[in-house]
Amino acid sequence: MTGIRRLAQHLDISIGTVSRALNGRPDVNEETRKRVLEAAAELGYVPNQSGRSLRQGTTNIIGFMMQTGAEITGQGDTFFMSVFDGVQTVFARHRLDLVALLCSSQEDPDDYLRRVVARGFADGLILSATQRHDPRLEFLAKRKIPFATLGRSLTDVGQPWLDLDFEGMAQTAIDRLVERGHQRIAVTRPHDDVNLGYIFVDQAASALEAHGLFLDPDLIFRSTPNEAGGYRIARELLSKKDRPTAILLVNESIAIGFYRGLSEAGLKPGRDIAVIGRHSPQTHFLSPSLTGFELSRRDLGIALAEALLATMPAFSHFYPNAELRKIWHEELIEGESDAFLLPHG
Amino acid sequence: MTGIRRLAQHLDISIGTVSRALNGRPDVNEETRKRVLEAAAELGYVPNQSGRSLRQGTTNIIGFMMQTGAEITGQGDTFFMSVFDGVQTVFARHRLDLVALLCSSQEDPDDYLRRVVARGFADGLILSATQRHDPRLEFLAKRKIPFATLGRSLTDVGQPWLDLDFEGMAQTAIDRLVERGHQRIAVTRPHDDVNLGYIFVDQAASALEAHGLFLDPDLIFRSTPNEAGGYRIARELLSKKDRPTAILLVNESIAIGFYRGLSEAGLKPGRDIAVIGRHSPQTHFLSPSLTGFELSRRDLGIALAEALLATMPAFSHFYPNAELRKIWHEELIEGESDAFLLPHG
DNA sequence: TCGCCAACCGTAAACGTTTACGGTACTATG
DNA sequence: CATAGTACCGTAAACGTTTACGGTTGGCGA
């Protein structure tokens, strides 16, 4: 005799009643419910998830899909970790099990997702590294699997998403640099097709145009989102004949490598070139201090989780007015890295 | 009509035979097996995992537990990511689903593990961040849950483990530095109780003693395993009256912060202080180049997965002679950061 | 011809839940 | 007192598998 049966026998009531008591159903005497809960605690009873899953068709699991692998594992990871932390706290409230699904760089993300779904692994999913055109979204929508994405996509299937304000960052940074007299401004973008790269570069271009300037295609640097990428960008940038006087770094982690690349050439941010980037826990230890954008990743994670739950029938009533689509503004932390003032004219 | 039943009906054979055919049982005609497999592919049938789990008492999931959170998320994460990548490839061969269980810094790892186990989440576990005394090991052993650890522990319950050769690293580094005339040598260790810290520091101490020197307790620096920690160590070290002439960095990520801390004070590794550390994909972009230890994290992950499988009855026959306990030697990559030669005497 | 064995397959129970349905006892209402 | 309604509980089916067991067929040796 095991499981709920054992508990029922011990209490001398039916398993149906035990189940109802445990699941908070209304049609059970509060007195007996109390007895059941106490006995459950005493006997250390925990419901068998396979049994529940089989009966209910749900797994109680939420998956957070991330990519990993040689080229991508930069500090980009720590960004996801922090977000994950926020997501975790929300799901824990609902006793949902959150797991990270790490897609290896060796495997195609679409295939990976297909496997996960075929197996009926999770009740809901969170996707990151959203591509500009992302087949995963259509796939999930077709299967009617609740999901939310960290990052917008042109492939819009009505799912909730949260994203960072790349437009705002590009705009603010460009305005700021142009005001200080810069005209040749470089930007960076990720090496792959994640959507944020397009958004950022496009906005930078139009912000420049608004000032009567333009974005030199030769000054758009692609790189992996890690220190190595930043280093390479510095080397490449320094090898150009007509160097830019300022640069916008779209990723957090690359700043460290970029700084290093400059210093090897005897150059210094804020003196020889203006740098505006994004802050991570690490970048606060750069010197000269980085001028960059920052936000609470944990809060972002919390909002992301709530957005997903709001679209899941079983939980939506908890979040009647969750924001299903939101752009998170990042604050500019002023540092010394863009102190560089061009002689006007 | 759904699931295996539908498939059976479509083929006009019994569900028992279908199941046997799919699971590679011997007592089924190869001709019918072929038909079943073809039909399964055609109808896109995938067995319901809840049903299997309920019947077999296994989940087909392996969990890789990692810690995360504000203080820990340094590049330490990227280490685990690479290892995870290796682990993944092995489990994929056996159609086991590997997921990452990220324990938030907000939660006690012991409690977290207890929850995971109570829920019957996984058939096997991999633990990282092994503490010197780790209650998790006894807990899992008592529950008879197969697991392996990344890192040794004094709490030995006979589980397989893999670890890095911290003794060898400490010994090699100390010998090398002493040979070059150093006498005041500092070491770092993690801020928490992970076992590697003890191993590393102890070995460094005894290596020094073998040279008639000793490890000044004042020169043992604790830090979080990330850039910020390295930066703080540099600051702290520089504030000492009687500065060491060399330092051993036990973590990969702290080198970047440490370099930065030095350069702020106008100091340079390899000129003003000898530095020996450990390499990550990122540290290769440091300048002056880092002298440090390196290994293939992916291979480590592969071995770790195989060690675990070797202890699981259902898979052990695949790995008859897997190494259940192994210390992974790391190669020393010579750089410029320890070029510093003390004037003898 | 008979018996035996091997090869293959079907039947049905079992895994641990949840939940629709119906039943009982009691209360309130007329 | 009859009836309706409420509050609570028990029964049993259902979820989709796997697998022990037994049954049928055909071949083969004696």
Image (spheres, coloured by chain):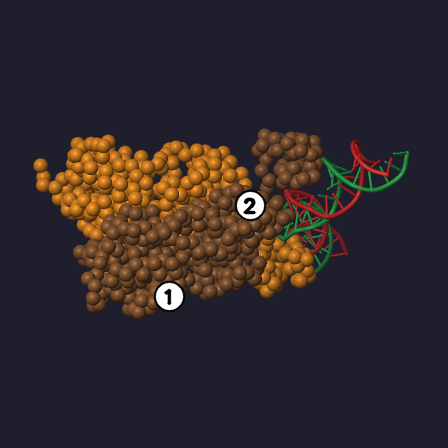
Chain colours: A brown, B orange, C red, D green
Query: Is A134 above or below relative to C21?
Result: below
Chain at tag 2: B
Mark in front: 2 vs 1 = 1
Q: Which residue has dot 1 on it?
A: A202
SS at badge 2: loop
The residue depicted at 34 percent of the width and 52 percent of the height is A332
Q: Which residue occupies the foreground of this view, B213 or A200? A: A200
Viewer-nearest residue: B275 or B142:
B275
Above or below for A90 versus A13 = below
The spot of residue A92 in percent (x, y) is 51, 43
* Quadrant for the C terminus of chain A in the image: bottom left
Indicate the amino acid at tag 2. Thr
B63 left or right, relative to C9: left
Q: Is residue A164 left or right of residue C7?
A: left
Of residues B148 and A322, which is closer to you in this image? A322
Residue A194 sits in quarter? bottom left
- Please tell me whether residue A109 is drawn above or below residue D3 in the rendered image: below
Task: Name the disc covering residue A96, or none.
Answer: none
Query: Residue drawn at (20%, 56%), measured in percent from left and top?
Result: A271
Q: Residues within 10 Å of mark 1 (few under 14, many from 20)?
A: some
Chain holding disc 1: A
- Indicate the secondary structure of the residue bearing disc 1: helix
- What residue does disc 2 label? B58
